[in-house]
Image (cartoon, coloured by chain):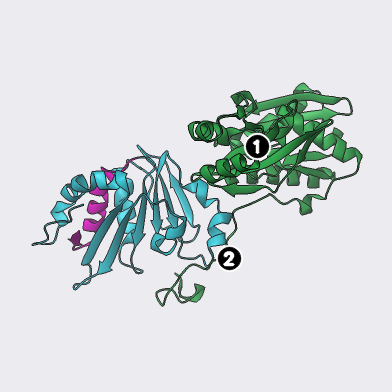
Amino acid sequence: MSLRTQSVEETRDLGEALAALLWPGDVVVLAGDLGTGKTALAQGIGRGLGIAEAIVSPSFVIVREYAGRISLVHVDVYRLDFVQELHDLGFEEVLDEERVTLIEWGDRVTGLLPEERLEVTLRAAEGPATRDIEWVALGPAWLERSDALAKALSPWALPGDGGRSC
Amino acid sequence: MDTATPQVGVALGSEHGLVAQIRLAQGRRHAEQLAPAIEYLLREAQAQPSDLAAIAVGVGPGLFTGLRVGVTTAKVMAQALEIPVVPVPSLDLVAYPVRFTARVIAAVCDARRGEVFYSVYRTVPGGVQRAGEYRVGAPGEVAAELVATGEDLLLVGDGISAHRQMFEDELDRAEFASTSFAYPSPSALVELACSRYRREDFVRASEVQPLYLRKSDAEIAWGPDRAGHEGAP
């Protein structure tokens, strides 16, 4: 389903709306080039999960953890070269059932991810702060929620896009 | 000490055997609990760190988060006290306490992500002998492999509890050890490590390596969107 935001703040709002549908144990992949707003989306999701602490890019430390209504693990694989580096970080345990996990550039390491996940892709569109955002729900628990998700994100739906039937 | 599972296990032994042990199984609290547990154990046993002759540590295979706390603590203590380390695989510490059986023992620990760490043991006088490698795999595959051995089995470990129904269905003749035996036994660590220490079968702190079974040679598929670290912010 195609969505569009016109500013960083709008991308955050979209993240906050998305967060309302997240359950502990969910894995969300954030894909998109540098500067397309993956971290802004993560900040909105953090706000929606009731995280008081400021969410900053995890690029440098790879993994950041936050406590909230639902706790959050924010991962960025951008600085890694080898899958082994993720094993060495205990990646299998980073993904746990009690927290939501966001993985920036997670589309590059799908072999390590659970089949059940939400993939959100951001793309720069015309206009300096305009972003086209698409999401794909994978696995039964996400398919179950895709109608609710489409509804929650409808304020940003592109005109004429009827949404994706799953 | 052993922290390869959700349990924090600490024990103190002397030449006469086990002196004291602590087992805390709350999960995810290794970093908070290990050092205080060691301190408490030594204090109540009226021992000083300088009384220690060696540090024994469970080196997995196990959960990374816990394992690195135990292995690091063991290395640092051994280095500071200038004493050797006796590394002992954590699955051995699961198998050893249930050795009073004629069955073949399968020690199976939860590896998360739908996988288990496992190894198979035969009982021998005074202990157990490993009959295969330490491995990681999907529980269904492990069960099929165990069925194929045709052996009478005793299954033990928190990997069994995590997938109990499946193991029961696949292995209808197997016995299952109770959950009291699910985690690596600190007293087993004392027993196994003491006999190794007597044989001078120990290593320097710097030589201790945890057993990580998850290995990959794969490179992450970066395209022109990330031209190496130089381009990274």
Residue type at mark 2?
Asp
* Residue B30 image offset from top left, x and y in percent: 60, 37
Q: Where is residue A67? Give x, y as percent.
A: 41, 40
Q: Does the magenta-highlighted stretch encompass residue A27?
A: no
Residue under numbered circle 2:
B217
Disc 2 and disc 1 on one polypeptide chain: yes
Q: Chain of mark 2?
A: B
Q: Nearer the viewer, mark 2 or mark 1?
A: 1
The amino acid type of the residue labelled 1 equals: Ala
Q: Dot 1 lies on which element?
A: strand
What is the x, y in percent for residue B28? 54, 37
Chain with cyan colouring: A
Camera-side residue of B68 and B149: B149
The quadrant holding residue B224 is: bottom left
State the hue of chain B. green
> Which residue appears at 51% of the width and 49% of the height?
A92
Going by the image, does B79 lie left or right of B180? right
Based on the picture, tell me whether residue A2 belongs to the magenta stretch.
yes
The residue range painted magenta reads A1-23
| Quadrant placement of the C terminus of chain B | bottom left
Residue pointed to by mark 1: B107
Compared to residue A77, the image places residue A95 above or below, namely above
User: Tag 1: Cα neighbours inside 10 Å, few (<14), some, or many (≥20)?
Assistant: many
